[in-house]
Image: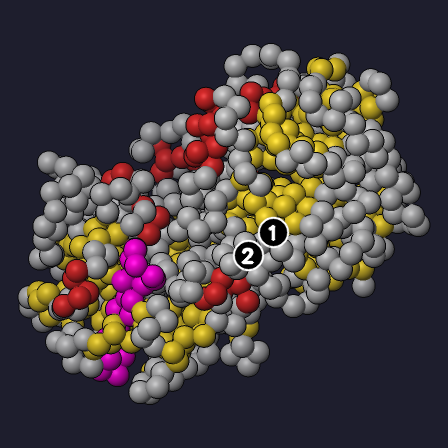
């Protein structure tokens, strides 16, 4: 098979996802790494002021490296513990100890790794992802690992692992180890020892190298509510004291006992404690006054050159707070809170306060780290990237995002409009969508209402090929309710948006679903717009399912909704609509169990047709649960290309009946597919096919100019880019295509 040299770059966002922790290598100035919840780890280049991903080599066969739970850098070596919890499925807690985690070790700053399995449960995007430090490299070369479910892990220098509980607790949050490895302090989630609706003890001390542990004094949680009790979150030390931040779960936490980090909802009743390293006496040094009235937890904590800083997590009123103490916690001052305290600026356009109800978007500030070579430099994590102060000791200190190169966002669908100034329409999680008019510059605040308030996680978009200035998008409403979910419409190719009213009043079930969609961050559904832009079909979502009974039709001229008539096909049936590229009266429905439907009356009613597709395919799922990709052939009536994972790539045609042909060979796997420019005209002409998949046993990105008769490989094994959710060809530029990843942003591939 021929290989075509390609170069790849991000259409930059940047940031956008949760950075969960930093690690400086104290052996050399400038060695800084960060981990994320879904996007693997990054190395910072001080000379370039940008981050470089350490997971570009990861493929769809094994995504564990995209989910790091622990990171340490010591003596020029990088250690990462990661996992995606795969062995947890269908197993008891005891059985999950079999080869779930992975230790990745690099001696060349993350350019290459050696791997070994760890016999414990690991998932970098689940409970405890924001706590730490979980991984300590001792002077002797032993590794101490505070695991999520299996207790304290110790890796000896011969590579053997042992795991033991801390007291009764196996659910840990961090571990601190003295230089002689005799004294250990471990934080726990208090899950195994819980009683009377309160967490068990959370902080323990060992003076015999981890053989046994005794409780250390910890703060009381005054509330007697479900899931009450403090959790030791993070620590810092200055050689005389160990400082520990604590947090408690809020009453409406959505993860039960597991909700002990920012992954559990909102936090409350936090405290900061100071422990003497001499006799382990404890003092409560929590910032006083208004801080204690705000009901939040404490997360990040750091100390250097006599300064101690700590941050809140889970605040409800306009973002988290950072405090500074110059006397080891005796007195505190706020140095960052929203836009009122501290000089903070946002370089990424979507981060600007005017896009967030006039407030700072800093939240989930769960790690603070001083540069060990320069106490003027303080880094902190947020739920939308890495931030930094380069003049922290100054009285006029400032803060700014520092996310260039970090592209940790989940992209769901991509579209290349055949005309207009938008080159790429990008549909993604949390940030909603971006309409790229320049593939080398961060996008402006693309998907927002007339007040510049963002819509968040979008599911898909559709537009008529003849007029792609008219765009319909399914969008979630934002967290604070200033935008509401449903269908949003642009008439100027994503420069401005209006929200269509939801179809209340059609029946009680749809009213219930519409009411849920209008609450913050709820999946809206899937949209399809016909060829002349006069009709929009929507299947409203319930979770990730597009129930067949939830199908509605919007008439653009009459500005009215009606129910869509579909055959009764049983409980749990689903349907996803696609519009015919040419005939405005034709819509198609793709359902569960490979079912196919056709409407010949502009989407008012559908009939089920015989399906020539392989059995058992589920088209009616959305979000990251969608394991198919459907692409219409622009300008060709009734023609679609389908990526059906293990069933491969198919072309489906309708001319009164459905006909299908498999374009990939049996045994090949195709995850995603897209169509791009091959020859004039694009609309109605022959297309280049782009796919991600496994052909002849090799995973990668491929293109075909002859309907799958032959394929060209477009990448090497060092550029596989993690989870892939969508692939799309450029409709106007030969050889260019786009990749929607679940871990490394949106990528642009161009022939070299």
Q: Nearer the viewer, residue 534 or 274?
A: 534
Q: How is the image coloured?
A: secondary structure
Give the residue at x 17% y 44%: 228
Give the residue at x 27% y 79%: 304
Helix or strand or loop: what does disc 1 sit on?
A: loop
10 Å crowding of disc 2: few (<14), some (14-19), many (20+):
few
- Compared across the picture, whether 171 is left or right of 87 comes to left
The quadrant in which residue 88 appears is top left
Give the residue at x 57% y 61%: 445
The alpha-carbon separation of the residues under discs 1 and 2 comes to 7 Å
Residues in magenta, as a range? 304-322
Q: Is residue 729 above or below residue 308?
A: above
Residue 610 falls inside the magenta stretch? no
Q: Position of residue 18 (x, y in %)?
A: 44, 57
Q: Is residue 458 above or below residue 652?
A: below
Residue 310 falls inside the magenta stretch? yes
Q: Is residue 716 visible?
A: no
Helix or strand or loop: what does disc 2 sit on?
A: loop
Q: Count the numbered circles shown.
A: 2
1 and 2 marks in contact (CB < 8 Å)? yes
- Compared across the picture, whether 671 is left or right of 289 comes to right
Q: Position of residue 580 (x, y in %)?
A: 78, 32
Q: Is residue 257 visible?
A: yes
Identify the residue under disc 1: 497
Q: Is residue 105 above or below residue 598?
A: below
Identify the residue under disc 2: 450
The quadrant in which residue 532 appears is top right
Sequence-wise first label, 1 or 2: 2
- Compared across the picture, whether 172 is left or right of 626 comes to left
Task: Farthest residue to the right: give it.
Answer: 680
Q: Quadrant of the C terminus?
A: bottom right
């Amino acid at each position: 098979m021929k290989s075509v040299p390609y170069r790849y770059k991000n259409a930059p966002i940047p940031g956008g996802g949760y950075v969960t922790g930093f690690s400086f290598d104290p052996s050399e100035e400038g060695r800084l790494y960060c981990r994320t919840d879904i996007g693997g780890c990054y190395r910072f280049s001080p000379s370039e002021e940008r981050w470089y991903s350490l997971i570009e080599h990861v493929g769809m066969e094994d995504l564990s490296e995209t989910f790091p739970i622990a990171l340490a850098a010591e003596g020029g070596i990088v250690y990462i513990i990661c996992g995606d919890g795969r062995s947890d499925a269908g197993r008891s807690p005891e059985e999950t100890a079999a080869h779930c985690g992975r230790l990745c070790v690099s001696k060349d700053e993350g350019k290459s790794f050696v791997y070994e399995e760890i016999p414990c449960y690991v998932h970098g995007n689940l409970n405890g992802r924001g706590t730490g430090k979980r991984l300590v490299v001792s002077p002797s070369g032993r590794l101490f690992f505070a695991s999520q479910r299996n207790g304290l892990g110790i890796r000896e220098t011969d590579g053997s692992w042992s795991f033991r509980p801390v007291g009764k607790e196996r659910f840990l949050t961090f571990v601190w180890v003295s230089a002689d490895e005799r004294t250990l302090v471990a934080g726990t989630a208090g899950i195994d020892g819980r009683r009377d609706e309160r967490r068990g003890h959370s902080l323990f001390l060992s003076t015999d190298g981890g053989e046994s542990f005794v409780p250390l004094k910890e703060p009381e949680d005054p509330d007697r509510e479900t899931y009450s009790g403090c959790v030791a979150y993070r620590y810092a030390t200055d050689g005389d004291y160990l400082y520990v931040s604590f947090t408690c779960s809020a009453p409406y936490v959505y993860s039960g006992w597991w909700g002990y980090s920012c992954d559990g909802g909102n936090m409350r009743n936090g405290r900061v404690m100071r422990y003497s390293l001499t006799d382990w006496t404890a003092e409560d040094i929590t910032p006083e006054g208004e801080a204690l009235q705000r009901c939040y937890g404490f997360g990040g904590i750091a100390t250097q050159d006599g300064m101690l800083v700590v941050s809140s997590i889970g605040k409800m009123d306009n973002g988290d707070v950072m405090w500074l103490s110059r006397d080891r916690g005796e007195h505190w001052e706020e140095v960052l809170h929203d836009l009122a305290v501290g000089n903070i600026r946002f370089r990424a356009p979507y981060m600007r306060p005017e896009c967030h109800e006039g407030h700072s978007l800093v939240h989930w500030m769960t790690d603070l780290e001083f540069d060990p070579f320069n106490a003027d430099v303080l880094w902190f994590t947020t739920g939308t990237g890495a931030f930094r102060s380069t003049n922290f000791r100054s009285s006029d200190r400032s803060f700014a995002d520092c996310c260039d190169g970090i592209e940790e966002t989940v992209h769901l669908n991509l579209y290349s409009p055949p005309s207009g100034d938008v080159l790429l329409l990008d549909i993604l999680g949390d940030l909603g969508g971006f309409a790229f008019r320049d593939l080398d510059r961060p996008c402006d605040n693309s998907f927002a209402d007339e007040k510049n308030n963002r819509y968040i996680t979008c599911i898909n978009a559709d537009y008529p090929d003849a007029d792609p200035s008219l765009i319909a998008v399914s969008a979630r409403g934002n967290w604070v309710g200033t935008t509401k979910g449903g269908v949003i419409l642009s008439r100027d190719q994503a420069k401005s948006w209006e929200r269509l009213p939801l179809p209340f009043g059609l029946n009680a079930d749809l009213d219930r679903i519409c009411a849920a969609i209008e609450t913050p961050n709820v999946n809206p559904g899937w949209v399809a717009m016909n060829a002349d832009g006069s009709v929009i079909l929507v299947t409203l979502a319930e979770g990730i399912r597009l129930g067949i009974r939830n199908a509605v039709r919007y008439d653009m001229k009459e500005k009215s909704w009606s129910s869509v008539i579909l055959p009764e096909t049983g409980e749990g049936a689903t349907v996803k609509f696609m519009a015919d590229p040419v005939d405005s009266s034709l819509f198609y429905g793709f359902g569960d169990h490979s079912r196919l439907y056709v409407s010949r009356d502009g989407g008012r009613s559908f009939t089920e047709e015989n399906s020539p597709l392989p059995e058992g395919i589920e088209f009616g799922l959305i979000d990251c649960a969608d394991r198919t990709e459907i692409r219409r052939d622009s300008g060709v009536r009734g023609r679609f290309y389908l990526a059906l994972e293990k069933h491969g790539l198919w072309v489906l045609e309708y001319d009164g009946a459905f006909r299908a042909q498999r374009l990939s060979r049996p045994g090949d796997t195709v995850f995603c597919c897209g169509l791009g420019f091959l020859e004039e005209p694009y609309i109605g002409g022959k297309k280049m096919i782009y796919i991600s998949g496994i052909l002849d046993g090799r995973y990668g990105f491929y293109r075909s100019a002859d309907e799958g008769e032959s394929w060209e490989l477009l990448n090497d094994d060092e550029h596989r880019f993690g989870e892939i959710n969508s692939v799309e060809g450029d409709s106007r530029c030969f050889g260019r295509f786009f990749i929607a990843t679940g871990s490394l942003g949106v990528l642009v591939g161009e022939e070299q």
